[in-house]
């Protein structure tokens, strides 16, 4: 039997987190390292792939040191990651050919508009479960191969490799021995066929993505490689769990039954509902995606993606400098009885589900001479809850039943005001778990199962614990009025594209 500790590596948009999880499923220690953001043009967002890797190394070293462990104590590694972010690198040197294009980046919006005008969106939806949007990896891959000199020729010769961030971390952990991705990440590329769970030749041709650059597709749980000697980790530690961050959170929240749902509040906001063994096509602007595949059995989900959630609070801190840190927003929001009529639509990179408007832009309406920073901060937090209601209402319409209970996780749910306002807007109970970093925990659970440290998903479910339940307390009339104001403000943000 291998050592009983699992090291979960969670590479996110604004930072990397590492958790050391003990044999009982408890979090023994945590490490964290921020990731620099690069904005070369308005609407463009990039990361340096080497900085991503360095941040993971730092976070992992911190976690192991805090736990009083060495690399030899690690029995399995789980990986979870920001998903659609796109990296292309040289197979021989492992050098990236360009910075990573981040999921938030809008540089390929015109390409998506052109393909939509040509009538391709129905086929894209039917085959991939996704929509034609710059959010996903397919058009990003093509942009890199077309923009970087000689890249397309090198790709055709098999000299280049594409990967989402999971593939990049797997490549670095194994020192180039494994080029693979799990099914959940593959389902976010626009190149995977949801029915066959394999790369789709028609989609690859549509997006001009050569098969030669694509990674092998593997299960979300089960050994897919072993570490090389990295210094901080020895040779031979099994990498036994991989999932995109939102799918990992769904697993970490023990949403194993069809109909169970979670919402993760991070840089963006992502609600997923387990739909079981068959993909469900949405008629209300949601995405059909793969949740995970374990021992060859695929589980699907419906997803609503909000592009800007916690990133709006980060903008208040870094862009406007009206707060010093995210923690103070709870008290600031409570210091005023309401927003004073201010509504904030943080469409900094367009709007995701259920609108899918690439050209909408951030909008703050209702400002008066009496507006203070507290009103704007409260409006930013309320916007996160409003956007989540947009998505969950669409889920309820697809499922023909309302969401009676929502499991929440992610750094922003430490904010009591946000959780309570979310319960009020949904008119539903909101459960906050003991461990809010459920994304990393889900990766640890997938790895522990894959390496044989835990017996079954039931053993994982036994470890899930709720810290607090928030219950709705707002009158129905007030709820309706506030949400109607939000919908009007959204239309203002969308008018930008039409003006």
Image (cartoon, rainbow, N blue to C red):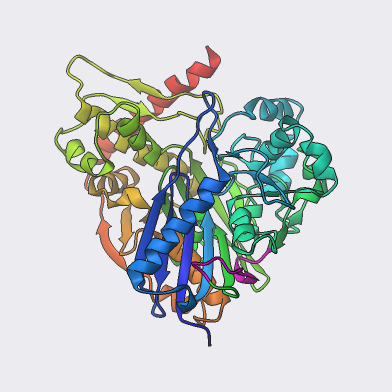
Whether residue 345 can be seen here = yes
Is residue 229 rendered magenta in the image?
A: yes
- Residue 327 falls left or right of residue 206: left
Tell me: 381 left or right of 51.
Answer: left
Vertical side of 26 occupied by 309: above or below: above
Residue at the outermost front position = 231
Along the line of sight, which residue is nearer the eye, 140 or 111?
A: 140
Q: How many marks?
A: 0
Which contiguous range is marked in magenta? 218-233
Residue sitting at x 32%, y 55%: 430
Q: Residue drawn at (58%, 44%), measured in percent from left and top?
A: 85
The image shows residue 365 at horizontal and vertical percentages of 33, 20
Q: Nearer the viewer, residue 353 or 359?
A: 359
Whether residue 398 is visible: no
Q: Is residue 60 magenta?
A: no
Which quarter of the picture shows residue 133?
Answer: top right
Q: Residue at x 48, y 56 (%)?
A: 56
Identity of the residue furthest to the bottom in this view: 1
403 or 213: nearer the eye?
213
Percent from the top left, x then y, of residue 491? 45, 23
| Name of the residue lying farthest toward the top | 499
Position of residue 355 measured from the top left corner of the image (x, y, whole percent): 52, 33
Residue drawn where x is 45% and y is 67% of the image? 254
Residue 415 location (% of width, % of height): 26, 48
């Amino acid at each position: 039997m291998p050592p009983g500790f699992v090291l979960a590596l969670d590479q996110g948009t604004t930072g990397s987190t590492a958790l050391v999880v003990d044999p009982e499923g408890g979090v023994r220690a945590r490490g964290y390292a921020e990731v620099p953001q690069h904005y070369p043009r308005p609407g463009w967002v990039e990361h340096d792939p080497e900085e991503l890797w360095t941040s993971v190394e730092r976070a992992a070293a911190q976690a192991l040191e805090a736990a009083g462990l060495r690399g030899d104590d690690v029995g399995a590694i789980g990986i979870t990651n920001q998903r659609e972010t796109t990296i292309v690198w040289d197979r021989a040197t492992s050098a990236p050919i360009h910075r990573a294009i981040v999921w938030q980046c809008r540089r390929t919006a015109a390409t998506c508009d052109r393909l939509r005008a040509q009538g391709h969106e129905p086929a894209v939806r039917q085959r991939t479960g996704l929509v034609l949007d710059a959010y996903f990896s397919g058009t990003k891959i093509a942009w890199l191969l077309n923009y970087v000199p000689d890249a397309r020729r090198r790709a055709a010769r098999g000299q280049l490799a594409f990967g989402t961030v999971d593939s990049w971390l797997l490549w670095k952990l194994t020192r180039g021995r494994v080029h693979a991705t799990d099914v959940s990440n593959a389902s976010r590329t626009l190149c995977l066929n949801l029915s066959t769970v394999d790369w789709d030749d028609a989609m690859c041709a549509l997006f001009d993505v050569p098969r030669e650059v694509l990674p092998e597709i593997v299960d979300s749980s089960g050994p897919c490689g072993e570490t090389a000697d990295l210094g901080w980790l020895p040779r031979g530690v099994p990498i036994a769990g991989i999932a995109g961050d939102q799918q990992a959170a769904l697993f970490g929240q023990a949403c194993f039954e069809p109909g169970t749902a979670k919402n993760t509040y991070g840089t963006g906001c992502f609600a997923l509902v387990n739909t079981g063994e068959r993909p469900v096509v949405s008629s209300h602007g949601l995405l059909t995606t793969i949740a995970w595949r374990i021992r060859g059995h695929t589980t699907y989900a419906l997803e609503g993606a909000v592009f800007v959630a916690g990133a709006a609070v980060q903008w208040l801190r870094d862009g406007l400098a009206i707060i010093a840190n995210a923690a103070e927003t709870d008290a600031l929001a409570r210091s005023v009885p309401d927003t004073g009529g201010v509504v904030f639509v943080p469409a900094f990179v367009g709007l995701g589900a259920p609108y899918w408007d690439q050209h909408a832009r951030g909008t703050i309406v209702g400002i008066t001479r009496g507006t203070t920073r507290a009103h704007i901060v409260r409006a930013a937090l309320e916007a996160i809850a409003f956007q989540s209601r947009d998505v969950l209402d669409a889920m309820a319409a697809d499922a023909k039943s309302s969401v009676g209970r929502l499991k929440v996780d992610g750094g922003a749910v430490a904010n009591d005001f946000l959780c309570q306002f979310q319960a009020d807007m949904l008119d539903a109970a909101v459960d906050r778990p003991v461990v809010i970093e459920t994304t990393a925990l889900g990766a640890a659970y997938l790895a522990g199962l894959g390496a044989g440290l835990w017996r079954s998903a039931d053993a994982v479910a036994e470890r899930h614990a709720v810290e607090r339940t928030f219950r709705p307390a707002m009158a129905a009339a007030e709820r309706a009025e506030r949400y109607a104001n939000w919908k009007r403000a959204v239309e203002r943000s969308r008018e930008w594209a039409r003006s």
